[in-house]
Amino acid sequence: MNNHELKQKLRTIQTLAAECLVQLNDIPTKTSAKASSVKSVYSGLTGGVHLLVEEGFFSTKKSLSTVREALDQKGYVYSRQAVHEALKSASRPGGLLVVIKDGKFRLYAERK
């Protein structure tokens, strides 16, 4: 086999592999398509926080308990401490969120 024939066979294999991936993505699963695509893009607790930001959840001030409830509803079930750490990371300088101190409570909102 010469170099040209090898390149042609490689292109054929790549095309077949791409077609297989498309077919695999079309197979229905037990979970809804929206939930599975959301989970694949936003994995882990930080991904859950990013999802809430993208959905506009933080357009108004939110408390830690409110954020935790919203994450639970989306299937991101984590402890209070874990959610607090993820919010702290997201509210560092230049991050997605800003922290507003309201007495002894901290509220989180989207950075403008």
Image (spheres, rainbow, N blue to C red):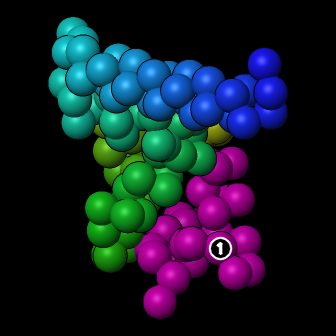
Tell me which amino acid carries mark 1.
Gly
Give the residues drawn in magenta, as a range: 84-112
Disc 1 is placed on an element classified as loop
Provide the residue designation for mark 1: 95
Q: Does 26 sit above or below residue 38?
A: above
* Residue in the foreground of this view, choosing between 42 and 99: 42
- In the displayed structure, does residue 37 sit left or right of residue 17? left
Q: Does 34 sit above or below residue 84?
A: above
User: Which residue sits at x=24%, y=23%?
Assistant: 26
Dividing the picture into quadrants, the one containing residue 58 is bottom left
User: Which residue sits at x=45%, y=74%?
Assistant: 109
Residue at the limit of the structure toward the front, as seen here? 2
The quarter of the image holding the N terminus is top right
* Residue in the foreground of this view, choosing between 63 and 11: 11
Q: Where is residue 93 in the image (x, y as percent from the top left)?
A: 74, 80
Q: Position of residue 61 (x, y in %)?
A: 38, 73
